[in-house]
Amino acid sequence: MRSRRIDPLRTISLAFVFVSLIFMATIIWALVDGSLPTLKEYGISFFAGDKWRPSRGIFGALPAIYGTLTTSAIAIAIAVPISLGIAIFLAHLSPPKIGAILSLFVELIAAIPSIIIGFWGMFVLIPLLVSFCPFLEKGGYTILTAGIVLAIMIIPIIAAISRDSIKAVPKSQKEGMLALGATDWEAITRSVLPYARSGIFGGVILGFGRAIGETMAITLVIGNTPGIVPLNEPGATMASLIAGNWGEAVSTPLYKSALMELGLALFLITLFVNVVARLLIRRMEKGAARG
Amino acid sequence: MELIMGGKTKLKVFAIAMLLSGAFLMGCIGESKLIIEGGGASFPFPLIEEWIVGFNEETGIKVNYQAEGSGWGISQLADKNVDFAGSDKPLDDAERKSVTNDGKLKVFHLPETMGGVVVVYRLDGLEGKTLDLNGSVIAKIFKGEITRWNHRNMCDLNPELTLPGKEIRVRHRSGGSGTTFVFTSFMHKVAPAIWPGNDVDKSPDVFLLPNGNDVGTGHKGNQGVAEAIKSEDGSIGYVELAYADSYELARATIYGMEANTSSIRAAAVGVMLPPADGNWEGTDILNVAGAYPIVTFTYLLVYKELSTIKGMNEDKAKALVRFLLYIMDDKAQDIAAGKGYAPLPREVTGQNVEAIKSITYNGENVYEGLMNDELVAG
Amino acid sequence: MNLRTRRAKDKVMKSLTLVAFLVAIVPLFYVIGTVISKGLVALNWQALGELPPLGFRNAIIGTFIILAVTWLIALPVGIMSGVYIAEYRGIFARAMSFLADVMSGVPSIIAGIVSYVVVVATTRAFGLAGSVALSILMLPVVIRSTEEALKSVPNSLREASTALGAPKWRTTAIALNTAKGSIATGVLLSSARVMGETAPLIMTAGYSQWEFMGMDCRVNSLAYVVYEFLRYPDKERIALGWSAALILIIIILAINIGVRILTRRKYEY
């Protein structure tokens, strides 16, 4: 009772929690407030417009949304099989003694700053891709290139979370299958992976969330030409459009507001994606704690 | 108990350390610091940077410049956040309205240097030879009407070259850019039938074809375009001269004119300029006889009355005027030639100096104040 | 399927996982190799010790100053919020914990816009705005690290302290003291990540050619120097930009590898 009456810690820490909440609320307020001019001017048609021509005052968000979704989808398509392979390799097949070091290698990729990956993509990867891929006839600055760069960046995330989910599967699952005469691979794919699927799925969605918000690396390799075009042509993502045009846009109120609204949309999408991912991952962690 | 006290003392030490370092880092706020902040166009940045270093060596005064784009500089000037702005194009009506608070303030356009925009390309097999182009061929290429290197118009202009039948890959800027503005202004001026007036803009939208597709691809900054052209055979684009130099790109002559310091400078000799505080929209030095045709001024935008800028004071006003005068001096102008720009002709710097000498702070002439300081010091 | 094909498939698929691993780490070494080979060209004492345009001394210092102020903002708020979440469990605490988790995925460009609107446009404090932007990115990680660290402190420790008659805040101070290594790990890894963030700094702290002059001025950073110099029309400057990239990557990888070797802790996403 005594400690409940005088518990300064509770009051103080609660105060700081509110400061955190203010931080988060400020993000939403700033984005909504900044988007108001375009919201008033265009309403919902902003998201239905398939043309982005700032010089004519035409702001349609579809090309940027298209770019964001396609680059992320390409990244996921490349990253998921590779990440799953890595996760299985690290969790079940690699020699346990060097497993930690091998994991470190994969995780270090995530530590490399986006801008450095971007310039590497521009100076090294693009010339390489152009000389190897005949379908990059319009040059190397394409949605596809951006997707490949993104894949490199999200593999560590998906791989690490998948590895943890796979490791959290009770040993008995695999052993049971092995006892029935299954090979290692069959035991892993038919018993371990299904058991770990919600965690793996959470990791994939988290990787997707990271992909849609990635900025500098994409800005440097995507060509920044907003349009709904084939994948071997240049495009733009919501984030790359904001980063690439902010400096010029701030002098034109409606242009700035259009970029802010793109930011708001990007923020809401990432928020939604993250909620789903975190729910799945928390379920995986709880399951692990019980098992 | 010892453990408990230990935790408590450590927390205290930690908190105090945080407060002290916070105070130190924030400390400089409020204290007067003499630094001139400018920003805007990235085109003149390499030159401005050189001036900043030279000016600091001479006077000890610090100037800083953010190369974030003309639009950024103009908006920061309109918000009175920067002491001067750099812009590749004159203020348009809307911009002048916001910068001058609806005409209540006077703002000077001060051309600071001249630059050339060059048409660069990569065509494997024709290394060491120079392609010649004219305005209408360039406009047709950027309109997607000429799509192959061996197009009849191209061959007619270059009878001594065997042009390949490769596809032309057009590379342009992706964001709003003064370079795009100059380039499209040129195409409109010399080939209005092919390049209409409403396709003169700094935005990359002007490269969209009627069917909604882009004629080529957009790239971030001069460097992005240069990098793209360097890495792809059959590509063509436009960059500022300095980038063509540093990326060692092949550049086309236009009407037989090669871009260099003297051919660029020739464009501004004998040109009629509006008054410094006037309307500069429409001022262009494109396609002047005897000069390289795609040439532009890049401007410093400065208020006539400096007290309107946030955080301005007398010392800062004097420092800014000294910096502006330094730029217009022959010594500073001569640096331009080595960096891919052209020094301004005397008649242009002369008009600038007159304007700079009329700058005031709280109604007092700043230049006279500087002269008085020198008299006292001397 | 007979046993032989099943065994063969087992072997093939297992080797494919090794291939997947190798495919993923090729970019790591390729990127690092590129940065080292291009970065060493211009890396010398002048690059480290002079101001731009000759070197990037102020960017190295500025990176750490921006980070220090980020700590000043994010650490007290984050640690105390984490304390609340871990020590006063309930529906509100659980919701906060989840919110922090979700917010850790906020794109860095969003942090840049928000900080521009809230700090730059109102106060013109460019350097501070940079730190605010990075705080937005770091805060959720600090909250979650503190929460996790405190939750992993054995309850027996708290019980012992309470039994000795210590009030709740002293007990928590002890728990914090026990968990500090773990919290520091989270903070360091997150610091390494925000140090490389460029997009928010372009909109806020910007570029400075001079020594640090206060958080109300432009503050140069390594990330910005990489961005600025690699787009410059001059080979020597581009080489200098790669040197800045090399220094940045060395700092970041050193923190990551160091922390992991010392704590064997895995990355938090």
Image: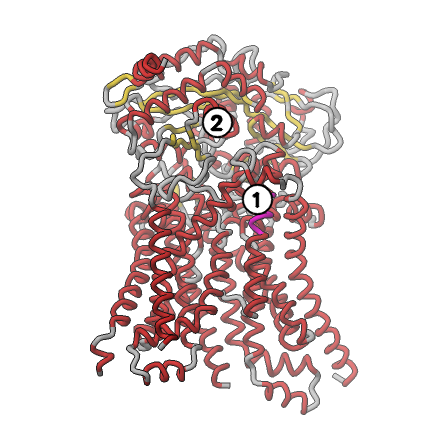
Mark nearest the camera among 2 and 1 is: 1
Callout 1 amino acid: Ala
Are dots 2 and 1 on a single chain?
A: no
Residue C244 is marked as 1
- Magenta region: C243-249
The N terminus of chain B lies in which quarter of the figure? bottom left
Pinpoint residue A27: horizontal percent, then vertical percent: 34, 55
At label 1, counting other C-alpha atoms closer than 10 Å, the crowd grade (few under 14, some 14-19, many 20 or more) is many
Camera-side residue: C94 or B293?
C94
Asked if one can make out residue A48 in the rendered structure from this viewpoint, the answer is no
Host chain of mark 1: C
Q: Chain of mark 2?
A: B
Where is A56 relative to C167, above or below?
Answer: above
Circle 2 residues within 10 Å: few <14, some 14–19, many ≥20: many
The residue furthest left is A5
**Relative to C180, is A74 on the left or the right?**
right
Query: What whole-number distance in Å separates the C-alpha atoms at marks 2 and 1?
Result: 22 Å
Amino acid type of the residue tagged 2 in the rendering: Ile
| Point 46% across, 34% down: residue | B67
In the picture as drawn, the residue positioned furthest to the front comes out as: B2
Residue at mark 2 = B48
